Image (cartoon, helix red, strand yellow):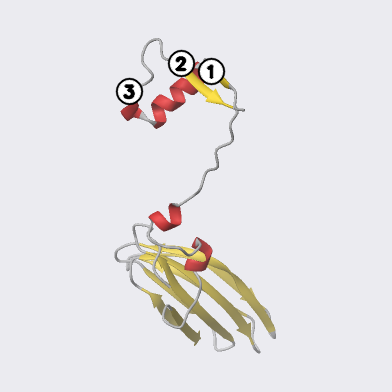
Amino acid sequence: MAQEFTINSNAIESKINQLLPSQGGFGAGVDFSASTMVIPIVDLTETAEGSNVREDLQTSLSHNNTTFTQFFNTTSNLVATTGYYSVLSNVFCDTTAGSAYFDITDSISAKKVYQVSLKPAGVFSVPRFIVKLEAGDTLRGVSTNTSMVVNVTTRQIADINGNLTAS
């Protein structure tokens, strides 16, 4: 059997007024009450947003949503469309030490977002990272010499407004 009791807390009342402004507060003389009854809460957020797939699965790689690029001793434009992109990469260094990096350019200036420097005969898997590209931005990959071979897979995971893209 559930018990009912009254809660008299200015902090709780203020928080409810902040979170639910349309309720107009409790009004004078109205108490906030609680119950010891357990009421299950079911999270329908994913379904309400139009998907029955968990968010991490919505960002998976598939045949239709990935772009693979391999380059060395050059600058490669990887993505030039607005949105959020997942970037997976590894770098191989053969005979001469060198570096490879990723940057975002707006055609005026470039800012590095990740760099790898390797000695000869090295391999490095770049941790997955996510970039946001706004209008006019381009994600680029740069390899400093022929010994630095870079393999990159990119996948758009959300549009510029943060809405997840279908896989």
| Amino acid carrying mark 2 in the image | Asp
Q: Secondary structure at mark 2?
A: loop
Res 7 label: 1
| Amino acid carrying mark 1 in the image | Ile
Whole-percent x and y of residue 111? Answer: 44, 63
Relative placement, left or right, of 122 versus 7 is right
Identify residue for label 3.
Answer: 24
Classify 10 Å Cα crowding around label 1: few (below 14), some (14-19), many (20 and above).
few
Identify residue for label 2.
Answer: 31
Relative placement, left or right, of 126 versus 137 is right
Q: Earlier in the sequence, mark 3 or mark 1?
A: 1
Res 80 label: none
Relative placement, left or right, of 106 versus 120 is left
145 to 85, vertically: above or below: below
Q: Earlier in the sequence, mark 3 or mark 2?
A: 3
Q: Are marks 3 and 2 in contact (CB under 8 Å)?
A: no
62 to 29, vertically: above or below: below
Q: Residue at x 40, y 10 (%)?
A: 29
Q: Nearer the viewer, residue 49 or 148?
A: 49
Whole-percent x and y of residue 114? Answer: 54, 67
Relative placement, left or right, of 167 versus 143 is left
Q: Are marks 2 and 1 in contact (CB under 8 Å)?
A: yes
Classify 10 Å Cα crowding around label 2: few (below 14), some (14-19), many (20 and above).
some
Q: Quick check: can you spot residue 144?
A: no
Q: Secondary structure at mark 1?
A: strand
Q: Nearer the viewer, mark 3 or mark 1?
A: 1
